[in-house]
Image (tube, helix red, strand yellow):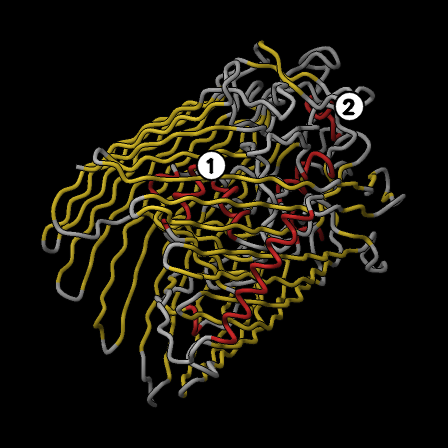
Amino acid sequence: MNPLARAVALACLVLSGSVALAQSADAPVQEVVVTATRNSKSVDRIPGAVSVISQKELETQYLLADDPSAALATYIPGYAPSRQKMSSTGESLRGRSALILLDGVPQTNPLRGGMREGYMADTAIIERVEVINGASAMQGMGATGGIINYITKSPKVDGTTQSVNVRMASQLRGDSLDWKTGYSLQHKSGDFDLLAFGGIQRRGLGYDGSGRALGIEAVQGDTMDSEGTDLFLKIGRNFGEQRLQLTINRFRMEGDGDYAPVKADFAAGIPTSSTAGTPPGAPPRNKVETSSLEYRHNALLGGSFNAQVFKQNFASLYGATNTSTFQDVTIAPKDTLYDQSEVVADKHGAKLTYVRPDTVVAGLELTVGLDYLRDRTKQWLAGTGRTWVPTLDFTSLAPFTQLEYEAGPLTVRGGVRHEDATLDVDTYTTLAAYNSRVVQGGERSFSKNVKNIGAVWRFTPTWSAFVSSAEGFGLPDVGLVLRAVKLPGQSVATLFDMEPIITRNNEIGVNWRGAMGSLSASFYDSRSKLGSVLRVNAAGIGQLDRVPTTVRGWEVSGELRAAKQLSAFGSYARTMGKTAATVDGAMDVALGARSQGPDKLVAGANWRFMPKANLRLQATTLFDRDINIGRVVGTSNLEEHFKGYTLVDLAGSYDVAWGKLGVGIENLADRQYIGYYPQSASYKDASSYFAGRGRTLSVSLTRSF
């Protein structure tokens, strides 16, 4: 543990608070507006913990690592550490699942969570990220931990602008070169605007702080030894108070299959590594296509109306393995059958929202809307064509209404959303490993009102406090439940494990935003009477247990702008998740790394040491975590151990005559460490005991003309 990093971060928070107390009440405050609440709204009027990662912050973080989850882990206190893999297993938000959106279009696959939703678009097209922490039903199913909405770029100024960006990263050894290039065209003329982007990326192999090749995740998928492409188009036209906009994005990411994993040697202290070789089967890949057509009318019957229709096609192929689950002696002798699974999810839907201010009385805002979603998800074995998870045909129709009343410094909000959903599944047969059971198809219906209420009190021009209580609606991983049916005579219509998850998040917090910085702090209590916990048994097979879960925690973050050229920032998050061994058992089991991250401290400083030059130094400390000592449920060992570590990064940029030059050094001290998830959840799995990246140098150049 690095005491210096901890001290620097705490000092940043204390200084931010001290400046806040001394700041003049008349200091100007720059308004920050988010759209993830279904209507453009200042964060000062939202009862809850809301974060916005700006384009400038994203660009700085991407100088260090072109990894969306690493940016979230840096800027969002309650977000778990990045896996540095294609798989996002364990990357939770406040100990729960987050609903990921791209311009409001759902990217998450809650019916069969393949944990690949983190890579669905090139980072170059993202303008900002809006994060609403805590359970929410505002954007639909799946946001039991919060909402992460990636907002794509749009043209801002009249005229035509072209830009080319190039990024190269290397650890100056072996096949460690990453390179990426992209071209974008922006045009805005009167009421018409267009943005087009095309990019390509190739990633090499990574090395840890000891110079050893990092382990390839050959089954779940890895960002190393991979290639990716992205094609993006956004076209919009204004018609007075109306606007029509079409957005299309096509993203691909696929492994090259040049390296095979080498198992860890725990006795010698050697983590999982890689060697030149070709793993069996086709390399893992992600294919995501997202499109939406949006219509807005800003002056309809005294209010604003927004309609969006969307479609998303998602396919994630996993690497080949001869796991016992895939064995079938009618196809091949035992332990010789290699197969690979693929999750395929196709969504389409519509979102209608109408907002009218001053309804009936001055200060009363009415929001009404209707959401429709059709989601068809399946998981099959691509090598043999077998069904692993049958097609899950999910249909949801959800009307909602929200009232907001503003009286001077006080804003009160409350609303209800009615979820009316149906899940249809045809009769199917489980794999031979599950005794080839015939499961009778059927229909399950879910109907639930999810509510929210909260208030914000702006008791000075720069200080505000909020209190909120909000519910989120989700389903357990239905695919995990259905694919593992082993008992005879089962029916989709009667499986108890498919009951919905209702999560209530109660929270209280305080915020300050002034000319010299900002400070925010909140405490939350998130509860699910019938939650969902994934436990892996001795055979390595995941089992979904429906048990109550509670997550409590607190977060504090701050920024101090001591001078125009110098600023400091820091955040600390403590997450405390508990569950039970059985439905009626005591809440005495700590949530493991699959569900929550460790306590986390982030600190750093920005220095504009020249008119066109910026430098950023940051440190992230993850704290030790030892839980569930000696605890076992069935054959699932719940014990986890994590030895924390501190990583320091350095990034800088300089505006030169021929473009913007950026340089980043990730893991500046070249620290040797084992990641949080591999230490905790995989500490006895020699195939998944992954070290983190050692010192990595990146250089980027963006030229606009």
Taking 421 as reference, is 705 above or below it? above
Which corner quadrant holds the N terminus? top right
Q: Amino acid at mark 1?
A: Leu
Q: Residues within 10 Å of mark 1 (few under 14, many from 20)?
A: many
Specify which label sits upstream in the sequence, 2 or 1: 1
Disc number for residue 438: none
Disc 1 marks which residue? 64
Name the spot of residue 107 as percent of width and height, x first: 46, 45
Please tell me in which quadrant of the rendered image residue 676 appears: top right
Residue that appears at 56% across and 34% down: 667
Q: Nearer the viewer, residue 533 or 207?
A: 207
Name the spot of residue 244 as percent of width and height, x first: 21, 55
**Which residue extends farthest left?**
190
Disc 2 marks which residue? 269
Q: Nearer the viewer, residue 403 or 698?
A: 698
Q: CA distance from mark 2 to mark 1?
A: 28 Å
Residue that appears at 61% across and 15% down: 260
Residue 260 in sight here: yes
Q: Nearer the viewer, residue 208 or 431?
A: 208
Taking 400 as reference, is 635 above or below it? above
Name the spot of residue 578 as percent of width and height, x first: 76, 57
Residue 443 in sight here: no
Q: Is residue 564 left or right of residue 155?
A: right
Q: What element does badge 2 sit on?
A: loop
Q: What element does badge 1 sit on?
A: helix
Residue that appears at 50% across and 72% down: 20
The reply to whether callout 2 and callout 1 are in contact (CB within 8 Å) is no
Q: Is residue 349 left or right of residue 77?
A: left
Name the spot of residue 534 as percent of width and height, x first: 71, 44
**Which residue extends farthest bottom?**
361
